Amino acid sequence: MSEVIIATKNQGKAKEFARMFQPLGFEVKTLLDFPDIQDVEETGTTFEENAVLKAETISKVLGRMVIADDSGLAIDALDGRPGIFSARYAGEDKNDEANMNKVLKELENVPDNERHARFYCALAVATPGQETFTVLGTCEGRILQEKRGSHGFGYDPIFFAVEKGKAMAELEPEEKAQISHRAHALRKLESELPSLLAGAEKK
Ligand SMILES: O=P(O)(O)OP(=O)(O)OP(=O)(O)OC[C@H]1O[C@@H](n2cnc3c(O)ncnc32)[C@H](O)[C@@H]1O
Ligand SMILES: [Mg+2]
């Protein structure tokens, strides 16, 4: 089985990528397997810019093809916040519960029909000496009034996924892997992977 490296330290993403890449014939390694590699500062102004930053930096460190994911939740009623700041919305410690509580509080008096939100996932594929390739996937929904379900990670308990009619955290992992922003992004990448890998292996 071929191996693909995802430049993430997020356990939730790591699990989802492992599940999604398996049927494509890839075993997933992440930065959790390379604990000595330092965090990449996410200084970009868009999901794509941050994904490129992470992928290119780690690809240079490891000298091989690397995929990075930058993702987050954009809420209409909050002018697109938390957006690229989703991981640290309630503070530097990246606490999922605190992040969700902050969103719920900010939307306290907002009615259901004004709670539209969208998950974004930018994936960047970087290989030393090659041009970086990016795709963007989205998932439509709205913010629930309270947390529901126990699967997934991040904002999943407060995100109602329109396509499934359930909270994202109420979906089994294989259901989320069909409809998530990450799944949509990966689907766009799939057709490019063989040529990206062929190029990567020539290096
Ligand atoms: O940068 P890496 O190491 O990949 O890990 P991170 O957690 O910092 O990841 P991001 O910078 O991409 O921030 C994304 C945040 O958006 C949220 N998020 C992304 N995808 C999500 C998903 O599928 N379900 C729920 N929340 C998600 C979650 O809070 C993440 O911490
Ligand atoms: Mg991050």
Image (spheres, rainbow, N blue to C red):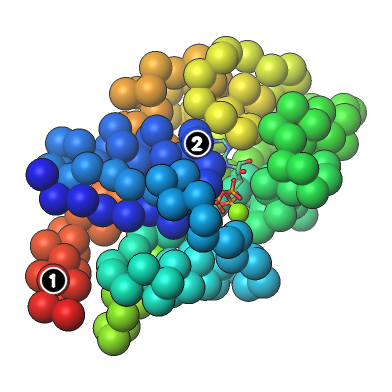
From this viewpoint, which residue is outermost toward the bottom? 129
* Residue at screen point 38% across, 35% down: 16
* Residue at screen point 13% across, 71% down: 201
Spot occupied by residue 202 in the image (x, y as percentages of width and height): 11, 78
Q: Is residue 127 left or right of residue 162?
A: left
Q: How far apart in space, not on screen, are marks 2 and 1 (Cα)?
A: 27 Å
Looking at the picture, which amino acid does disc 2 mark? Gln
Q: Is residue 174 left or right of residue 95?
A: left
Residue contact between numbered discs 2 and 1, judged by CB atoms under 8 Å:
no
The residue lying toward the viewer, choosing from 103 and 109, is 103
From this viewpoint, which residue is outermost toward the front? 36
**Residue labelled 2 has its Cβ within 8 Å of some atom of ligand 1:** no
Question: Quick check: 93 above or below 137?
Answer: above
Question: Quick check: 81 above or below 27?
Answer: below
Ligand 1 visible in quadrant = top right
Spot occupied by residue 113 in the image (x, y as percentages of width and height): 70, 31
Is any atom of residue 11 visible in this view? yes
* Residue at screen point 77% across, 43% down: 93
Is any atom of residue 181 visible in this view? no
- Marking on residue 201: 1
Q: Is residue 103 left or right of residue 113?
A: right
Spot occupied by residue 181 in the image (x, y as percentages of width and height): 44, 44
The residue lying toward the viewer, choosing from 92 and 34, is 34
Looking at the picture, which amino acid does disc 1 mark? Glu
Q: Which residue is mark 2?
A: 11
